[in-house]
Amino acid sequence: MGGGAVGVAIPSSWCAYRVVSFPYRAPARVEGTFRFALEGRLPAPIESYVAEPVTDIIAAGAQGSRLTACACPVERLELLLEAFRAAGVEPRIVQPSAVCLARYLATRGAGDGGRGGWLIRLDGADCEVVLATEGQVRACYVVSLVDLDLSDPASIESASERVGLVARAHQIGDGGAGPEEITLLAPAGLSAALAESLQRHLVAQVRQPGADAMESKWLVAYQAAAQVARRKGSVVNLRRGELAYQSFPGKMQRRAALALALALATVCMMGLYTVRGLAEAHRQIAQALVRQRAVAQEVCGAPSSVYALEAAVADARKEAQAVERAGVVSCIERWRDLMLRVPPALGVNFELLDIDQTRIRIKAVAPDSKRAEEFERRLRGSPVFVPSATSKMSRLSTGGISIETELRYR
């Protein structure tokens, strides 16, 4: 992977967002004290978070100022970085997906004029609501939809009602007007019905760029890649303090940064964290069942041995660990394997990557048919992947060969 760099976009639900105010405006003073202003406004002590401003310092009142900050638990970031390091990768930046979505709004010309642009994105069982101005996050809310079946019209109405309550609460707290226009990123099968419902609840025009759920993750990853490739200006980065990025020897190549960072959509992070969480839950349940059986024996008058209980707990732990090892497929390692099979010198540009626990979906463009065939040959010769028999190649009117394929894991 040469001297390339990696940018990671984490789910917005991992972070808390807070607006903090100051009676002064000096940038150095604000940047040095904003973490203290978050004390008492987070579920745990500030020392257990990495905090980072996601907006510039904004004038407020005669001499005061304010900014929006995000805070992510250190424990989650350490787990994330540990997983990447196990795959031989060291991310240069880590930032919330809300930051990437704010930049996306700016690239589309939304959010200008001071009032800000609103973006709503369905991401699995969560709905992100992001308010951004000039490419910066002013506010971010994550609405849980885990109890709703969005194939049901009544559930779509319930989802829109929840988003509407969040928007009105923000409007009251911020003292501003509601949204005039909203950008919606949702799966194609839900987008039209959800847009119609949101327009009724928010009394605002909803536009649909046409990105489906997978492509919305991709544009989040693309914006993270653009942040890595920037050479000037400030970049939101949760890698601070002890988690600060240690640069590799050698010069970073702009093209390599884009090629590597584009692959890291938030779906990889969510999949990794969820699998580990399930394994931990399995471990806790197994231990609870052992204790329950021991208590039941004691109540019924049968002797309960402490040593037998400890042995049973040890067996349960071994069983849970075996389940964990068998069930975890590292999306990060599969992405790394793919990057190693397709070096930058081949000239293949990825337009889309969707990585989960079972397969990788790819859309790419090769400069010519010879390199497209070489790309396919490299994938078929991989000891890790099994290419799909339904791969598609087509010649583009603008030149080059379009490649669509799916790789299963061996």
Image (tube, helix red, strand yellow):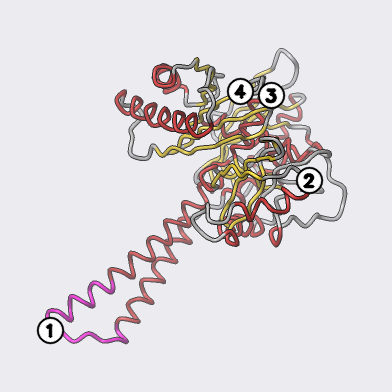
Q: Characterize the magenta stretch by its predominant secondary structure.
A: helix
Number of residues whose C-alpha sits closer than 10 Å to that of mark 4, classed few (under 14), some (14–19) or many (20 or more): some
Ranked by sequence position, the earlier of labels 1 and 2 is 2
Q: Which mark is residue 301?
A: 1
**Residue at position x 50%, y 37% in the image:** 141
Specify whether 163 is left or right of 52: left
Ranked by sequence position, the earlier of labels 3 and 4 is 3
- The amino acid at mark 3 is Thr
Tell me residue 379's x, y (percent). Answer: 65, 40
Ranked by sequence position, the earlier of labels 4 and 2 is 2
| Mark 4 touches mark 2? (CB < 8 Å) | no
- The amino acid at mark 2 is Gly
In magenta segment, residue 306: yes
Of tags 3 and 2, which is closer to the observer?
A: 3
Q: Secondary structure at mark 3?
A: helix
Of tags 3 and 4, which is closer to the observer?
A: 4
Q: Which mark is residue 269?
A: none
Start-end of magenta stretch:
290-308
Q: Which residue is mark 2?
A: 4
Tell me residue 403's x, y (percent). Answer: 64, 27
Ranked by sequence position, the earlier of labels 3 and 1 is 3
